[in-house]
Image (cartoon, grey):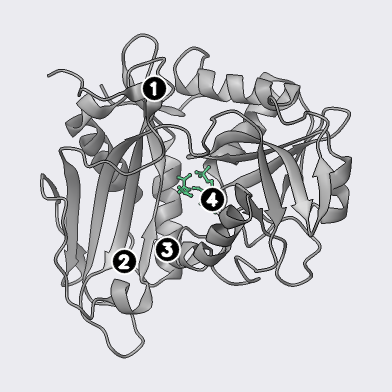
Amino acid sequence: MAKKNIDWSNLSFAYQKTDKRFVSNYKDGKWDEGVLTEDSTITISECAGVLQYAQTVFEGLKAYTTADGHIVAFRPDLNGQRLENSARRLEIPVYPKDKFVDAVVKTIKANADYVPPYGTGATLYVRPFIFGSSAVIGVKPADEYQFRVFTTPVGPYFKGGAKPITIRVCDYDRAAPHGTGHIKAGLNYAMSLYQIVDAHNQGYDENMYLDAATRTYVEETGGANFLFVTKDGTVVTPKSGSILPSITRRSLVYVAEHYLGLKVEQRPVPFEEVKDFAECGLCGTAAVISPVGKIVDHGKEICFPSGMDEMGPVTKKLYDTLTGIQMGNIEAPEGWIKVIK
Ligand code: PLP
Ligand code: COI
């Protein structure tokens, strides 16, 4: 089999159908074995739980080609664990994390020709998800579910790749205290669509959400956690019960402490403190680390000393080390890299 004829270096972050996807159905209280199929379409009841009451949770991870030609995935076990946690919060039957990893491996293997070659800057994005497939009209969980995993080759999430972006402080909330901000549920993203369209219309790349209760602490953006660097080189990342526990952020904290010898603080970050930081970045599977050059708060600009041309020096070190680990150029901590083939 040969790699597909794709212009790998010019891919954007967009869906493109690949050959195979994994599908498993939950019926009569149990998940079936699941199969790989070529059918990228789904036929369900007009009254399915997912369509009426947004009963769906998902994950996102990436597969890479390493320098020595292997295909690997980055910490899929953590995505499996998070999907379990997300499912419990929405009364969705848990798809066990070991079976999750098997399904992810099978799907990547079946689409190996779509894994971008080493050095192109592109990756294979993997999207596992579960949704309520049977009909419900009263507000209650569905009886039947489908778990699927599809893949799509992608380039950078923000146009321009590693170029610093501009974001704005958003007047709407993303998640409530004791709500669903800490899980990866479609509903969190549905309620961010108005804000992201408006942000783009106003010329911003993303929204910075503040805590819904006091609007004084930094939460996250619509699709990534924040990472700041102080003027004396300490990495600071917001701690909150209503943000998604980013696997990229958790990995970067480890990289900062154990590979780069940096001091890391994971704590609530008052928005008031943001103007004093030297660097700012967004971290996530899709975002990797996207540097933020400017934050606009109702006309007031916070311009980071790292500027609008390139990543700040600490962000760059974090970026190089993390991507070096993911692409197999730097030795990974035990268990971080799942070799697919
Ligand atoms: N926060 C939100 C809201 C996200 O959608 C994502 C993306 O998955 C992240 C953070 C980053 O999480 P991860 O690093 O696990 O991809
Ligand atoms: C990811 O990073 O995997 C996400 O799910 C974020 C999404 C905005 C694409």
Q: Nearer the viewer, mark 2 or mark 3?
A: 3
Q: In this view, does 5 lie to the left or right of 72?
A: left
In primary-sequence order, the first of circles 4 and 1 is: 1
The amino acid at mark 2 is: Pro
Secondary structure beneath disc 2? Answer: loop
The amino acid at mark 3 is: Gly
Which residue is tagged 1?
9
Q: In this view, does 29 lie above or below 300?
A: below
Disc number for residue 93: 2
Q: In this view, does 46 lie to the left or right of 258?
A: left
Q: Distance between the residues labelled 3 and 1?
A: 29 Å
Residue 323 visible in the current orientation? yes
Quadrant in the rendering for residue 15: top left
Q: In this view, does 164 lie above or below 96?
A: above
Q: Residue at x 41, y 71 (%)?
A: 90
Q: Which residue lies furthest to the top in this view?
A: 68
The amino acid at mark 4 is: Gly
On the image, the x and y values in percent for residue 157 come to 49, 39
Quarter of the rendering occupied by the N terminus: top left
Q: How far apart are marks 4 and 3 (CA)?
A: 12 Å
Quadrant in the rendering for residue 76: top left
Front residue of 46 and 128 = 46
Which residue is tagged 3?
186
Disc number for residue 223: 4
